[in-house]
Amino acid sequence: MNGRGQYGAPRVGQVIPAPAAIYVPREPSSVGAWILGTIAVGSALLWARHQSRQIEQLYKTAGLPQQSFASSLRQSAGASFQGLAERVRPKRLPPGRSD
């Protein structure tokens, strides 16, 4: 048999050797990397908060109503849930009405 290997599906009764496990050594994370990551995440949060306040100030200056992301999400989730509930369970009509 050829020493270069065999392609395709194994034959009936053929024993396939299990592949050898390869372990890659990993260095432990350093304190510097944790500090740098914390600074990066904290900076991103502060920047997002600053941007949110800037947008809020622009809406106030223009006299337009502004809806926060959380309240917008709550409103759309409520509407989605209400639509889902109506599809699953139709509205009940008062006694004596048949629309």
Image (cartoon, rainbow, N blue to C red):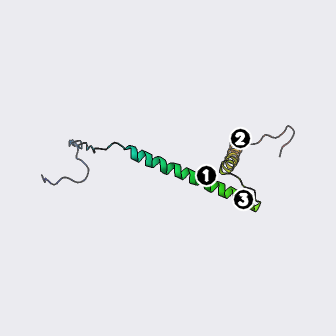
Comparing labels 2 and 1, the label whose residue is closer to the camera: 1
Q: Looking at the image, which residue is at 48% across and 51% down?
A: 40
Quadrant in which residue 34 is drawn: top left
Identity, as a three-letter code, of the amino acid under mark 2: Arg
For disc 1, the neighbor class at 10 Å (few under 14, some 14 to 19, many from 20) is few
Residue 15 drawn at (x, y percent):
20, 41
Question: Tag 3, which secondary structure?
Answer: helix
Image-based side of 34 in relation to 5, left or right? right
Circle 2 residue: 89
Q: Looking at the image, which residue is at 28% across and 44% down?
A: 25
Question: Tag 1, which secondary structure?
Answer: helix
Closer to the camera, 64 or 6? Answer: 64
Q: Looking at the image, which residue is at 50% across and 49% down?
A: 41
For disc 2, the neighbor class at 10 Å (few under 14, some 14 to 19, many from 20) is few
Closer to the camera, 48 or 79? Answer: 48
- What label sits on residue 64 in the rendered view? none
Question: Tag 2, which secondary structure?
Answer: loop
Query: Is the Cβ of the residue at disc 2 closer than 8 Å to that at disc 1?
Result: no
Q: CA distance from mark 3 to mark 1?
A: 16 Å
Identity, as a three-letter code, of the amino acid under mark 1: Arg
Residue 37 drawn at (x, y percent):
45, 48
Identity, as a three-letter code, of the amino acid under mark 3: Tyr
Image-based side of 34 in relation to 98, left or right? left
Circle 1 residue: 49
The tag earlier along the polypeptide, 3 or 1, is 1
Residue 88 drawn at (x, y percent):
68, 42
The tag earlier along the polypeptide, 2 or 3, is 3
Q: CA distance from mark 2 to mark 3?
A: 40 Å
For disc 3, the neighbor class at 10 Å (few under 14, some 14 to 19, many from 20) is some
Residue that protrudes farthest toward the right in the picture: 96
Circle 3 residue: 59
Closer to the camera, 17 or 63? Answer: 63
